[in-house]
Image: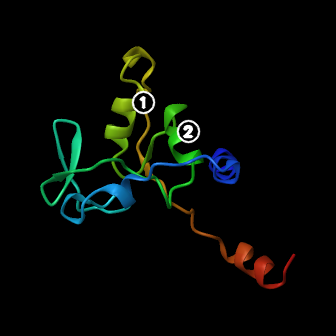
Amino acid sequence: PVVNYMFMRSGYSIYNFAHHLPAKERTGCCVTSAHFEERDRILYDKGKRLTYLHYIGISPKIPAAACAGENITFPYRDLFLHYRYLHEPEKRPVFTTPPKPYNYKPPTSFWQKVLRKLKL
């Protein structure tokens, strides 16, 4: 985010695929869209190849944790890991624990709820 902000403030011209593609060639790009189809490690939206995949809505800590070996599932995780470790596959994490979803929140106990209500 800081680099994006600095680049926007720099005054340099930025090419935005979303604004320059013809309407019939535009696709979705949000990683939380579950309707993309994966074929041969490429994502498609209604038969059209995605130009890029935007990880908006997922904290950068989630892919970082997966890269560090924590078994966290997030949309298109295997595809992300494939390209992340494309040139160094030996560094790709091997998961040995059961996966947990990226948006998992452990249930709060009764006492935690009471303390939260009392603002302690």
In the image, what residue occupies the spot 51% across and 56% down? 58
Between 112 and 48, the one nearer to me in the picture? 48
- Amino acid type indicated by mark 1: Arg
- Numbered tag placed on residue 38 in the rendering: none
Give the vertical position of 61 relative to 28 (above or below): above
- 8, 105: nearer the viewer: 8
Which kind of residue does numbered mark 2 sit on? Ala
Tell me the quadrant of the picture where the C terminus can be found. bottom right
Q: What residue would you read off at disc 2? A: 64
Can residue 17 be seen here? The reply is yes
Work out which residue is located at the far bottom of the displayed protein and give it: 117
Which of the 4 image quarters holds residue 34? bottom left
Q: Which residue is drawn at 40% across and 15% down?
A: 90
The answer to whether 113 appears left or right of 39 in the picture is right
In x, y percent, where is residue 5?
67, 52
* Residue extending farthest left: 47
On the image, the x and y values in percent for residue 108 come to: 63, 70
Q: Identify the element where label 1 is drawn.
A: helix
The image shows residue 26 at horizontal and vertical percentages of 26, 60
Residue located beneath label 1 in the image: 84
Q: Name the spot of residue 80 as percent of width and height, x first.
A: 38, 39
Which residue is painted at 50% across and 42% down in the image? 63
Q: What element carries label 2?
A: helix
Instruction: State which tag comes first along the sequence, 1 or 2.
Output: 2
